[in-house]
Amino acid sequence: MTFSSLTFLFVFFPVTFLLYALIRNHTARNIILAAASLVFYAFGEPVAVMIMLISIVLNYLFGRGAAGTKWDKPAVVLAVVLNIGLLFAYKYTGFFTEILNAVFRLSIPVPQIRLPIGISFFTFQGLSYVIDVYRDKKNVQKNLFSVLLYISFFPQLIAGPIVRYSDIAAQIQEREFSFDRISRGVCRFLFGLAKKVLLANQMGLLADKVFSFGGGQLSTGTAWIGAVCYTLQIFFDFCGYSDMAIGLGCVFGFDFKENFNYPFISGSIQEFWRRWHISLSTWFKEYVYIPLGGNRKGRTRTTLNKWIVFFLTGLWHGASFTFILWGLWHGLWQMLETYQIVPTKKKWFKPIGHVYTMLVVILGFVLFRADTLAQGFGVIGAMFWPTAGTPAVTREILSLLSPLFFLSFGFSLLLSTPIFRVFRQKAEQTGKIAVYNYAACGGSLVLFALSVLTLVSSSYNPFIYFRF
């Protein structure tokens, strides 16, 4: 976090919440949230906060222009150019400079530009606001302060989920603040915190250790351990953050859409992407895939459009060939499913669909996690070419397989399924929903205590998506 986790939990959030609860005026409450959001961001990015503020003001002006009739198209074009240009300048300048140097044997100095936290998220939200206004003039917001709150709201500012303005525009103007929302939001936040601290961080210990070695040093078993642990780590890390953002939003009266829907139970890659990082998938669908023609211009054009979207999805995650190849890898399997080369719609395939999907996902995340393509292919090679690896490396990795790890691993597998959703549905059907809610609140308090104890005794471990 921009704050340390404990500072956020015991200082920033309580102070913000108390001020918000004590002041009943709606406009004043918006001011409190906006000011808190700027403090939250500026604490870790004191210079970059100015970049974000400039971006917000420009997108507000572009939105006003897009709401008219004479300058609406130029306003949208300019918004796209400047938002993507800002993202390119900070995130991709060095990457493409290195490519130019390598291809044309140049010696252009590679700029070392520090990437502002969350720039990929707040630029996408600003751009979606302008495009939504262009599509429906009624979405325009004449109050700059409301646009500021929408883009900078601290729960989802630096790692999503990406929120469309039209989804929360009414809530910025008027929303509910009640004990029920507070209790539900706090429970959701604490469950998200536990996912990060108690599950993702534990899986990360093994994954980081495995990926600190080259593929040639790993045995087949340790390579698989690293790949599976990183897959679980990134899911619970990012899903945990999304839960925390959704929970905090609920506390303050905002309803953010779900960002994950148990992606590891998917039976195809297409289904996986309907369940994984839903806000990003929806963004690319609404603002790239559909404008390119979507699936309206034949199967070949549909396939090309998907390849473009997945190339951009990979590139959005970072300026590296590992991310690009990860995106294209998923695009490849989407294409194979579209053409039924992988027959996911056949009844006989369904029993193995889950295994196939998880294999594709795990291999993709090896590339995603690797520092270089060579390392990624080295780990994948060790996974499928039986090898004993380096004995000392194997012992070092296996020494981390503690009882705590196996406990976390077991819960990670369990919580990758909708088991608690099933329990809740049964509680509703049997009239025991109150008992379920009390148990959930009690469980969240236990998880909070365990999370705090873990945070006190562990080193700083930021969310993975902070760097995107």
Image (cartoon, grey):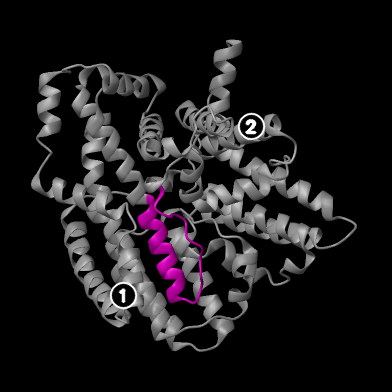
Q: Position of residue 438 (x, y in %)?
A: 26, 79
Residue 252 located left or right of residue 403: right
Sooner in the amino-acid sequence: mark 2 or mark 1: 2
Which residues fall within the magenta stretch?
Answer: 238-263
User: Which residue lies at the image location 62% right of the left edge and 43% below the top edge?
Assistant: 86
| Residue 61 part of the magenta-drawn span | no
Q: Determine which residue is flagged by label 2.
A: 303
Q: Amino acid at mark 1?
A: Ala
* Residue 254 circle label: none
Q: Quadrant of the N terminus?
A: bottom left
Near-viewer residue (197 or 358): 358
Q: Is residue 447 above or below residue 30?
A: above
Near-viewer residue (50 or 195): 195
The 10 Å Cα crowd at callout 1, few under 14, some 14 to 19, many 20 or more, is some
Instruction: Give the residue at the far front of this rendering.
Output: 348
Q: Determine which residue is flagged by label 1.
A: 427
The 10 Å Cα crowd at callout 2, few under 14, some 14 to 19, many 20 or more, is many
Q: How many marks?
A: 2
User: Which residue lies at the image location 51% right of the left edge and 37% below the top edge?
Assistant: 113
Residue 100 located left or right of residue 465: right
Q: Position of residue 67 (x, y in %)?
A: 80, 63
Q: Position of residue 373 (x, y in %)?
A: 41, 22
Is residue 414 among the parts visible in the rendering? yes
Residue 141 located left or right of residue 45: right
